[in-house]
Image (tube, helix red, strand yellow):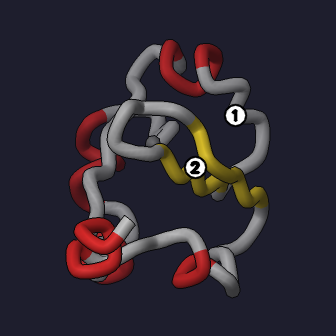
Amino acid sequence: LWNDPNLKTFTHWHREKKQLITWPSLWDQYGLMANALHVSTYPTYILFDAAGIEISRWEGKFPDNLKGYVHTSKEDKRN
């Protein structure tokens, strides 16, 4: 989620950094999702499972141990 104050800021500010993001990233214009997810610190990274259940949350920096939470499709077929 991005809490940029307007769409122009969301689409143009830090464009180079935002282009490196490989996951869905949404502009939260009214702060509805931030409130629903209890996000008070930026950046906050939230990892959900396939059912939409929160698995883990990291506040303030990108998680070092993300690979420990993410399974490849081959691993999923074995479990």
SS class, disc 2: strand
Residue in front for this viewpoint, 21 or 11:
21
Whether 67 is drawn above or below 59: the answer is: below
Q: Position of residue 32 (x, y in %)?
A: 50, 13
In-front residue for pair 77/10: 77
Q: Residue at x 69, y 34 (%)?
A: 39
SS for dot 1: loop
Residue 54: quarter of image = top right
Q: Residue 40's image quarter?
A: top right
Q: Which residue is mark 2?
A: 46
Q: Point out residue 75 in the picture as x, y percentages from the top left corner.
A: 33, 78
In the picture, the disc for residue 39 is 1
Measured as percent of width and height from the top left, residue 68 is found at 60, 80
Q: Please state which amino acid type lies under the numbered disc 1.
A: Val
Question: On screen, 37 above or below 8?
Answer: above
Q: Is residue 31 above or below residue 13?
A: above
